[in-house]
Amino acid sequence: MDKKQLIVGIVGPCKSGKSNLKEGLKAHGYKTNHIAQEHSYSPQMWQKIVAPDILIYLDVSYEKTLERSEMKWTQEEYRKQQNRLSHARKHADFYISTDKLSEKEVIELSQNFLQNSHIGRHTKIREVLFPNVSLKSDS
């Protein structure tokens, strides 16, 4: 599928890097949608509103969210976002933990995945683990 036709959805908790990834992929010609699933009580909102061809899940630890901004929130609020995101995380085509990655690395890893993966829903989840930064296929 041509990347200009591909719709890439991006989900994750607050401060995981969704806005940066959206802009980075957009600059490379991808049509992206930041889906505010973390604020929705509808587990399948990401499917209903956007229905992306590819869903990228960005994750971040609670501690890192506090480092990345002046955001004042509790671990309980973070946990609630994680619960709201569980359906999207389960169905993500690509998962990245952004704690130890730069914005540039997240964009590069996502772009590499999009260029080298079999495009379409239900692609096996790939997980990026740092410091190995290796793609592992689910069996």
Image (tube, helix red, strand yellow):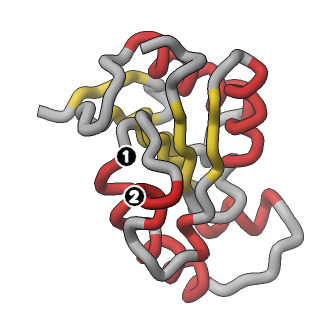
Measuring from the top left, give residue 47's x and y in whole percent. 41, 56
**Near-viewer residue (23 or 33):** 33
Mark 1 element type: loop
Q: Amino acid at mark 2?
A: Ala
Against 127, residue 73 (above or below) is below
Quarter of the N terminus within the rendering:
top left
Q: Residue at left 88%, top 70%?
A: 70
Left or right: 17, with 35 as reference point = right
Left or right: 45, with 22 as reference point = left
Left or right: 63, with 128 as reference point = right
Q: Residue at left 56%, top 46%?
A: 10
Measuring from the top left, give residue 7's x and y in whole percent. 53, 33
Q: Residue at left 72%, top 34%?
A: 102
Q: Residue at left 60%, top 75%?
A: 39
Q: Quadrant of residue 111?
A: top right
Mark 2 element type: helix
Q: Which residue is mark 2?
A: 88
Mark 1 neighbour class, 10 Å CA radius: few under 14, some 14 to 19, many 20 or more? many
Measuring from the top left, give residue 26's x and y in whole percent. 73, 27
Count the labels in the image: 2
Q: CA distance from mark 1 to mark 2?
A: 6 Å
**Near-viewer residue (21 or 102):** 21
Q: Quadrant of residue 4?
A: top right
**Near-viewer residue (88 or 107):** 88
Measuring from the top left, give residue 52's x and y in whole percent. 46, 42
Q: Which residue is mark 1?
A: 92
Whether pointer 1 and pointer 2 mark residues with C-beta atoms closer than 8 Å, the reply is yes
Q: Amino acid at mark 1?
A: Ala
Quarter of the C terminus within the rendering:
top left
Against 85, residue 79 (above or below) is below
